[in-house]
Amino acid sequence: MNAKDFLSQAWILDEQVQSKLMQVEALKSMACRVMTVYGAEPVAHTRNASGMEDVILRITEAEEELQRKIDELVSAKPRIGLVISRVEDPSIQLILEKRYLEFQPLSKIGVKMKFTYRWTRELHHRGLEAVQQILDEEDNTSA
């Protein structure tokens, strides 16, 4: 795995968590509307119960998938942080932490660190190279 893919895992998982959260909320909203409609008009109990069971089952499945993604995110961030902590230059470490653990854009990171955007990009690039070396070393020792 290359450095950028490794470091981007947390952002991808965070986006998936946000998407799953929205899906769960949409299903819960739908369930509320379904209960309101079913409550307003008498409908045969078998259809009513079956429809609600389907909605509840979908909500449960979506919540379980959400929890799996949260668990993946919670375990990915420390792994990424550990690799970043092995980078020697503290400025590069900070850029990588803010970029890949806090999901901040490089332009914002540069402003906070009082670096030009160009210098921030250069340090970021150096950080990716350093992380790639660390990942390659880990691959060589585990092989």
Image (spheres, rainbow, N blue to C red):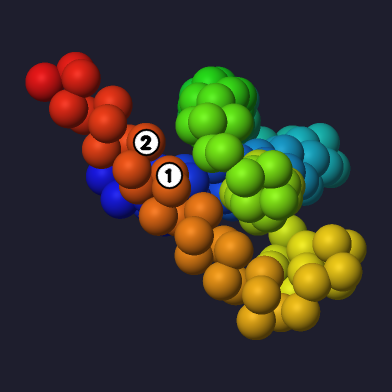
- The image quadrant where one finds the C terminus is top left
Residue at the extreme left: 143
Of 29 and 137, the residue lying toward us:
137
In the rendered image of this protein, does residue 141 appear above or below residue 122?
Answer: above
Q: Is residue 23 left or right of residue 111?
A: left
Amino acid at pointer 1: Val
Other-residue count near label 1 (Cα within 10 Å), few / some / many at <14 / 14–19 / ≥20: many
Establish if 32 lies above or below 59. Answer: below
Q: Secondary structure at mark 2?
A: helix
Question: In terms of depth relative to the viewer, which is nearer, 131 or 46?
Answer: 131
* Residue at the front extreme, as displayed: 88
Above or below: residue 5 compared with residue 138: below
**Mark 2: few, some, or many residues within 10 Å (few <14, many ≥20)?**
some
The reply to whether the C-beta atoms of the residues labelled 1 and 2 are less than 8 Å apart is yes
Tell whether 36 sits left or right of 74.
right
Name the residue carrying label 2: 134
Q: Which residue is mark 1?
A: 131
Where in the figure is residue 54, as x and y percent of width and height?
A: 51, 31
Residue 103 visible? The answer is no
